[in-house]
Image (cartoon, rainbow, N blue to C red):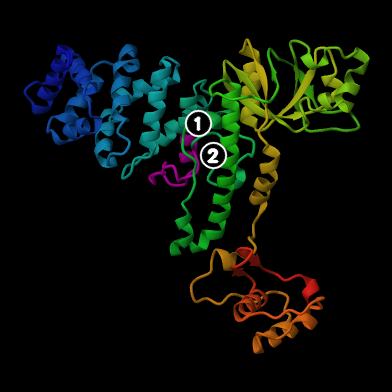
Amino acid sequence: MTDPRTKQLDKRFHDVLRGTTTLEQRSSATRLFLEGLCAQTDPAKCIDEIVASSHGLEAIQTAMRADLKLDFLDKLGSDVLEYLLRVKGMGGDVLNAVIVKIVEPPIFWSEFYRAFENDNLSQRAQHVFASVLVFLLQMTNKDVTPYRNLASRLIDKILSSDQHEVREAGYLIKHILSTTTTTAPVTTGPETPGGRHDNDFHDFRKIAIIPTADELLSKRKPALLPASFLDDPEGKETRIRDYLDNTFRLLREDMMSELKEEIDIALKKKQGRHRGLVVDGIQLVGIYTGPDNRRTRWGLQLRCASDFPIFKNVKDKDRRTFLTNDHRGSKLLRHQSLACLVTDNTVLSLGIIHREEELLAKQPPIIILQIEGQVSISKTLLQFKVAKHVRLIQIDTAIFSFEPVLKALQKMLVLPLSEEILLWENGKPVGSPPIAIPQLTYRLARDHSVDIQPLLDTPKSIRLDVRQAESLLAGLNQRLSLIQGPPGPFLLSHMPNSCN
């Protein structure tokens, strides 16, 4: 049963829309109207009623300007905007009309973004501001130049926020600003790459193989195309690039799924057995670049708070030998294994272990961690200055099994057999292979039952039936053939030189 106050707020809201109650600047009626708006159970219906009413848009504009004090901006004003933005799937023009009425002319909006710029908003209100800015930048049939200019001025501040949600909005804003036009909207559906986090780009070749902390925190769906995109005739010009892009993202999503599950188990967010090493209370003590005669990619020197239990009963003089020769020691923090830094049960960054036995053998041990990406490095160094407790968690996901293939896909410019696999159309002849064997194909084409033992120099006689002969001829005369039959379907392509 609805409580009396909610009923009263609902009545005040609809009285204003019907015109039976008018709003005056700085009156208590404006606050009750906005509270009544937020009390509506269906945001889509609420917005439709505001636009349909001859009094609705003027009323919300008046109410949002009535009080420009920080308390209003941080609380009720942000409540209203947060409520309106819940309608993400509604027709853009309807929601545009309401939001534009609030921000133009920029009486309320100017005070709101100044409060953000001056760090006067709460964490929730900061997220609301960033979300509204994303919405304004994507409006259609509207000159968004003022909002692009504002976003360009504030983007560094947004991206440096200590809130993941605000940074996530910042990544999308940065992606939108990278577009060339000022009015073209940027699609943000799950199928569109770019702007979801700091490692999400339209060009898959720019994506770092090792994920960032914000990428792991992101709840946005991956940018994957359905298989039907290969059949779209309008996408023929970009089909090879799209195929490489989608293949990369699919394989990397498999890697990310394993990685996220392993991290959730390590952080005890999910049940399971964590197989990697956990080191509590590590400290940053320096930068490692390798010895003078064997320089390596630089990494962070992380000193452990205490010795590893595995060194129990190992003499000091034998510690390094234990790490290299003993099977137990050789498994400790294996070279090129993945690890993450964690503070307050949140992943700070991921990196690769550079195993240096001389440092691992120290008391306490020193671990070398090589972190990918300038943004991750900056965040990590800043957190080491302020965080009270940092852990290193070794991740047992087999990144090494994914990484070579993912890097090869990023470097690939030409796809072998693309004409036959991706661009072939019904009725189009398949090209001939680079190696021809006329002495076999000519005889077999004339007589399917001919003994091909002397042609292939096999120890036994070989006579094919009609279907087998047709399959073999197809494999020898075409660049690519699919032959189905015992022991199963297989591809025959580019016959080896030994058959010539």
Where is residue 386? Give x, y as percent. Answer: 62, 12
Q: Nearer the viewer, residue 468 or 300?
A: 468
Q: Main secondary structure of the magenta part?
A: loop
Q: Secondary structure at mark 2?
A: loop
Which disc number belongs to residue 200?
A: 2
Q: Earlier in the sequence, mark 2 or mark 1?
A: 2
User: Is residue 424 part of the magenta span, yes or no?
Assistant: no
Question: Residue 175: where, in percent of width, then height?
Answer: 49, 39
Q: Is residue 230 above or below residue 87?
A: below
- Do the CB atoms of the residues marked 2 and 1 lie less than 8 Å apart? yes
Tell me, yes or no, whether the highlighted magenta stretch contains residue 181.
yes
At 75% from the left edge and 14% from the top edge, which residue is drawn?
304
Q: Which residues are magenta?
A: 170-195
- Quarter where residue 94 is shown: top left
Task: Locate residue 404: give its quadrant.
Answer: top right
Left/right of residue 128 with respect to residue 332 in the rendered view: left
- The numbered mark at residue 218 is 1
